[in-house]
Image (cartoon, rainbow, N blue to C red):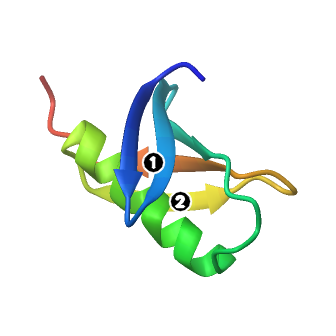
Amino acid sequence: MPGQTITVEGVPFTVTDTAGGVTVRNFETGFTDPALLLSYAAIAARRVTGCPVTNITKDTGVNTYRAALDCPPS
């Protein structure tokens, strides 16, 4: 997977820059609670970017999350 790899509580994620934020993916096989995975995805986005996550949503049917960020201007 493209992007930066990061592990949160033993669950690996990749974080990729996208328009308006980042896309966070993982390959969880169904053993972790979906709400917990959403929380971990937000943590992964924040750790990789250093920016607060203002909104995160899960794509239907896959472990792909879209995170909007509140980053200061560079």
Question: Compared to 40, does 33 lie above or below?
Answer: below
User: Amino acid type of disc 2?
Assistant: Ile
Labels 2 and 1: the sequence-earlier one: 2
Judge whether residue 40 can be spotted in this image: yes
Q: Which residue is mark 2?
A: 56
Residue 66 horizontal side relative to residue 53, left or right: right
- Quadrant (top left/top right/bottom left/bottom right) for the N terminus: top right
Residue at (41% x, 34% y) in the render: 5
Question: Compared to 55, does 47 lie above or below?
Answer: above
How dense is the environment of label 1, judged by Cα within 10 Å: few (below 14), some, or many (20 and up)? many
Callout 1: SS: strand
Is there CB contact under 8 Å for labels 2 and 1?
yes
- Where residue 73 appears, as percent x and y from the top left, is 15, 30
The residue lying toward the viewer, choosing from 35 and 51, is 35
- How far apart, in angstroms, are the residues tagged by discs 2 and 1? 6 Å
Callout 2: SS: strand
- Where residue 40 appears, as percent x and y from the top left, is 45, 65
The residue lying toward the viewer, choosing from 51 and 30, is 30
- Where residue 28 appears, as percent x and y from the top left, is 67, 57
How dense is the environment of label 2, judged by Cα within 10 Å: few (below 14), some, or many (20 and up)? many
- Quadrant (top left/top right/bottom left/bottom right) for the C terminus: top left
Q: Quadrant of residue 72?
A: top left
Q: Which residue is mark 1?
A: 68
User: Amino acid type of disc 1?
Assistant: Ala
Question: Compared to 32, does 58 lie above or below?
Answer: above
- Where residue 39 appears, as percent x and y from the top left, is 47, 71
